[in-house]
């Protein structure tokens, strides 16, 4: 559904930009 970049967690879909922030915070954990 969303693409996460290893460099800084970036999403190709702007609509999921909120989910991206959550994924960036949850993924490292």
Image (cartoon, rainbow, N blue to C red):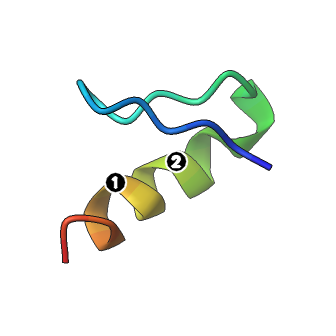
As drawn, is 21 to the left or to the right of 19? left
In this view, the residue farthest toward the bottom is: 29
Q: Element under label 1?
A: helix
Q: Please provide percent x and percent y for residue 14.
A: 71, 26
Q: Is residue 11 above or below residue 20?
A: above
Q: Element under label 2?
A: helix
As drawn, is 1 to the left or to the right of 3? right
As drawn, is 18 to the left or to the right of 5? right
Q: Is residue 3 above or below residue 24?
A: above
Instruction: Please identify the quarter of the rendering in which residue 13 is found.
Output: top right
- Mark 1 to mark 2: distance in Å? 6 Å
How many residues crowd mark 1 within 10 Å: few (<14), some (14–19), many (20+)?
some
Q: Is residue 3 above or below residue 12?
A: below
Which numbered circle lies on residue 15?
A: none
Asked if the residue at tag 2 contacts the one at tag 1, i.e. Cβ–Cβ closer than 8 Å, the answer is: yes
Q: Is residue 29 above or below residue 10?
A: below
Residue position marked by numbered label 2 in the rendering = 20
As drawn, is 27 to the left or to the right of 15? left
Task: Say how many tags the image has.
Answer: 2
Between 28 and 22, the residue placed more toward the observer is 28
| Residue lying at 32% horizontally and 66% vertically, measured from the top left | 27
Q: Please provide percent x and percent y for residue 6.
A: 29, 33
Q: Please provide percent x and percent y for residue 23.
A: 44, 60
| Residue lying at 19% horizontally and 78% vertically, measured from the top left | 29
Residue position marked by numbered label 1 in the rendering = 24
| Residue lying at 70% horizontally and 44% vertically, measured from the top left | 2
């Amino acid at each position: 559904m969303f693409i996460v970049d290893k460099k800084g967690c970036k999403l190709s879909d702007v609509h999921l930009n909120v989910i991206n922030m959550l994924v960036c915070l949850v993924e490292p954990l």
